[in-house]
Image: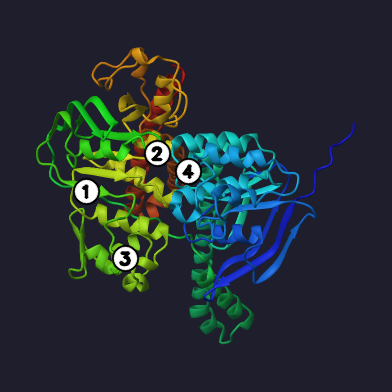
Amino acid sequence: MPTTMALPPLLTLQSIRLTFGGTALLEDIEMAVAPGDRLCLVGRNGSGKSTLLKIVAGLVEADGGRRFVQPGATVRYLAQEPDLSGFDTTLAYVEDGLAPGDDHYRAQYLLGELGLTGEEHPSKLSGGEARRAALARALAPEPDILLLDEPTNHLDLPAIEWLEEELSSMRSALVLISHDRRFLQDLARSTLWLDRGVLRRMDQGFSNFETWRDEVLEQEERDRHKLDRKIVAEEHWVRYGVTARRKRNMGRMRALADLRSQRREQRKVQGNVKLAASEGETSGKVVAKCEGISKSFGERTIVENFSTIIQRGDRVGIIGPNGAGKTTLLNLLTGALEPDSGKIKLGTNLQMVTLDQRRASLDPSWTLREALTDGRGDKVEVAGVTKHVVAYMKDFLFTPEQAGTPISALSGGERGRLMLARALSTPSNLLVLDEPTNDLDLETLDLLQEMIADYSGTVILVSHDRDFLDRVATSVIAGEGDGRWIEYAGGYTDMVAQRGHGVRARSGTEPTQTRAEKPSQAAPKAEPKPQQAKRKLSFKEKHALETLPGEMEALQDKIARHAKRMADPDFYSRDPDGFQRVSAELQDLETKLAEAEERWLELEMLREELEGK
């Protein structure tokens, strides 16, 4: 039977090494990109993902190693901060990236899909518009290898979903860096994980990444524990064995030195951000009540005849295309803006904290210490606990040396963490989050989701992150165009199921429903249609369902060890107190295991019931 020959890689990296400031950023990196590959590159902020992608693109030269590209293979790279200088229009910039024989119509098509005409002068572009022009330039030639660094930044939901479809239809090999989970899940077939200078590859999509990552880290922890035990045994021999024998076994001493050196040099996984919100007094049951509110600017209607009730504990997401008026609606709901007509009544005892997507409240001349303390002393009070500012900085992965760093020198990810740190240190019962996921890595997003799930107050957020909305929102308010907003129960996926489509661009086609058939205001929460009352697992339930099997396995291991000790016929006579203690612990462990098994069974049955609906 004939066999199919595997195609050779289009690009390879061999033994790539790079050092910054005496610290190894990349160590012996091996990487291959084959025709048709769909690779996502993931890792913590600061792990070197963007630098590695620049090495792949040939824009950064490594300290050592070899980069090889197949002759004739084309590579295109989307930078986070593109340079459009030297071009008169965006169309000229995009067409400059085309090779002879490429379709020039595609340049105009891509610019139009991304909301540009092609006539814009680069000097007049916003940062988001420049990014969209650069994205069109990267996509236009349909290269053999397409390298995209955070391609969804500055894109709204319609543009993100359009980009997914466009990339899916292309034959180019892809290497993607993104914090958008749904984007990675939909596109990636293999995962590259850059962690502490080492690149690992898993030939499965991103949806399997977190399980794989946790398994790798758990094995590292077991290996570290074994090494610690071995060091203790060797130190015991050094202290007592040398004296007994009155001579030194130099080979064994060198082995101990090597073990200690290994332990010192082991690069432990970077810690997680520790998120805890300082919760204020309890607000009234009704946080905001809107009755038929409308708002226009000039002849343009932003909100028309919208009604809703937001109650204590709700997590309300606001979604829509760029320019739909999401921030205007947010300002109306929180009382920052008065409606032209209708009534807004805010609840009692509200303590609101806002996270601004533009990071506008950060004075660039402040140092990190001043930003966290507002220039007053060196203490921060968080969730009722007073901390030194340096300890609080460490909770958000800042080093003590960064205390005097001006904010203007921080990266986008660091500014995002700083804004979270400031917002969460202020007592509140209403969190208003405008694009909170910008520049946050996946692990920090996980912890932000968990913090929101545990927060006893109310959350109103604007986001284009579909996965984030699915994980935290109890309802979403979606812009339907022409100032109409409708509220849907559940997260983004629930909204799509009820609505029949995702968020459409302002200039896009209207849904099949005619204007006369469309409701003029939000569907009330209290009277949802039967199909809208779809129950889904909460974030805590999903988390428990994923973690309980591991907890049960750990309990079973402990029970087995205790049972083995109890089986020793001499245990009681040798140590009666120890026997009683182990017996009590065994009974407690068996009770915990039974409770965990019962809880897991309940959740699994609930999951099957919900998925079967």
The local crowd at label 4, few if under 14, some if 14 to 19, many if 20 or more residues have their Cα within 10 Å, is: many
Kindly identify which residue carries mark 2: 322
- Checking the image for residue 126, the label placed there is none
The local crowd at label 1, few if under 14, some if 14 to 19, many if 20 or more residues have their Cα within 10 Å, is: some
Kindly identify which residue carries mark 4: 180
Pair 3/4: label in front? 3
Please say if 187 is above or below 134.
Answer: above
From mark 3 to mark 4, how far is it between C-alphas?
28 Å
Q: What amino acid type should be assigned to the residue bearing mark 2? A: Asn
For marks 2 and 1 on the same chain, the one whose residue lies earlier in the sequence: 2
For marks 3 and 2 on the same chain, the one whose residue lies earlier in the sequence: 2
Q: What amino acid type should be assigned to the residue bearing mark 3? A: Pro
Pick the quarter of the image with the N terminus.
top right
For marks 3 and 1 on the same chain, the one whose residue lies earlier in the sequence: 1
Q: Image quadrant of residue 54?
A: bottom right
Measuring from the top left, give residue 266's x and y in whole percent. Answer: 53, 67
Q: Nearer the viewer, residue 561 or 535?
A: 535
Report helix, strand or loop for mark 3: loop
Pair 3/1: label in front? 3
Kindly identify which residue carries mark 1: 353
Please say if 530 is above or below 21.
Answer: above
From mark 4 to mark 1, how far is it between C-alphas?
25 Å
Q: Are marks 2 and 4 in contact (CB under 8 Å)?
A: no
From this viewpoint, which residue is outermost toward the right?
A: 1
The local crowd at label 3, few if under 14, some if 14 to 19, many if 20 or more residues have their Cα within 10 Å, is: some
